[in-house]
Amino acid sequence: MKTMVCHGDSLTQGADLSPNYAWPLLVENQVGIKIINSGIGGDTSGGLLGRFYHDVVQHKPDVVLIMGGTNDLWWDLDVNNVLANIFAMTCQAEYHNMAPVVGLPLPLYMENIRQQKMMAPIGGWENCIQKLDRLIDALSFSARESDIAVLDFYHLFLGDNGEVQGQYFLEDGLHPNKEGHMLMADAAAGFLKSTFHLA
């Protein structure tokens, strides 16, 4: 394994942080393979699918990690639409001889979010959180049924009591801070080493 593309939205891009602190680059430094960050802030799963060939296939990676859907839920799009887009990308990945990995996006830290003056999701915060929970379950189930590896960032940000660990989030409550990216990087590096037998 020599190359991996991390394909996603702002959770992959590294919103409001220098690229040097985004988890894909931190993983590259840990495992010694080339990692291409194709995260674009605000992108939906449909956007990821639309640019999959240009931003993923043309690089001919050995592995692609696909993580999206939070922005779809922000616009109150259906969970099944997200599933269809994510798994269309896994099918394209396998067709082009790359191993797909489904990333589970982060929870929302509502304590910080409530203090921000930002536009609420189209269907409201409670609806968005409920849909995110359903998306996590659906992605996990569908990936398992399709024998596709899953990198679970969602539960990584929950404490033993199931509460979101706010110390890993920026003030917006949506994106991980430097410590959050380090947490993701350590988890991703360990996952890659065990799943793809990297030294």
Image (tube, rainbow, N blue to C red):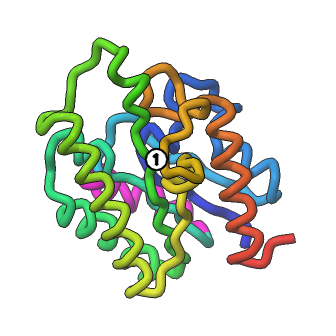
Main SS of residues in magenta:
helix
Q: Left or right: where does residue 87 sit relative to residue 46? A: right
- Write the residue at 23% across / 43% down: 128
Instruction: Give the farthest residue toward the front.
Output: 161
The image shows residue 48 at horizontal and vertical percentages of: 34, 53
Q: Left or right: where does residue 112 sit relative to residue 99? A: left
Quadrant hosting residue 61: bottom right
Q: Left or right: where does residue 123 sit relative to residue 42? A: left
- Write the residue at 25% across / 60% down: 82
Q: Quadrant of the N terminus?
A: bottom right
Q: Quadrant of the C terminus?
A: bottom right
> Looking at the image, which is closer to me, 36 or 183?
183
> Looking at the image, which is closer to me, 141 or 93?
141
Quadrant hosting residue 196: bottom right
* Helix, strand or loop at mark 1: loop
- Write the residue at 70% across / 68% down: 192
Residue kind at label 1, given as amino acid type: Leu
What's drawn in magenta, residue-wise?
Answer: 45-61
Say if the magenta span includes residue 59.
Answer: yes
Quadrant hosting residue 89: bottom left
The image shows residue 194 at horizontal and vertical percentages of: 74, 75
Q: Is residue 108 above or below residue 99?
A: above
Say if the magenta span includes residue 28.
Answer: no
Instruction: Give the farthest residue toward the right.
Output: 199
At label 1, counting other C-alpha atoms closer than 10 Å, the crowd grade (few under 14, some 14-19, many 20 or more) is many
- What count of labels does the image hold? 1
The image shows residue 179 at horizontal and vertical percentages of: 68, 34
The residue to which callout 1 is attached is 106
The image shows residue 62 at horizontal and vertical percentages of: 62, 72
Q: Is residue 136 above or below residue 42?
A: below
- Write the residue at 43% across / 34% down: 109
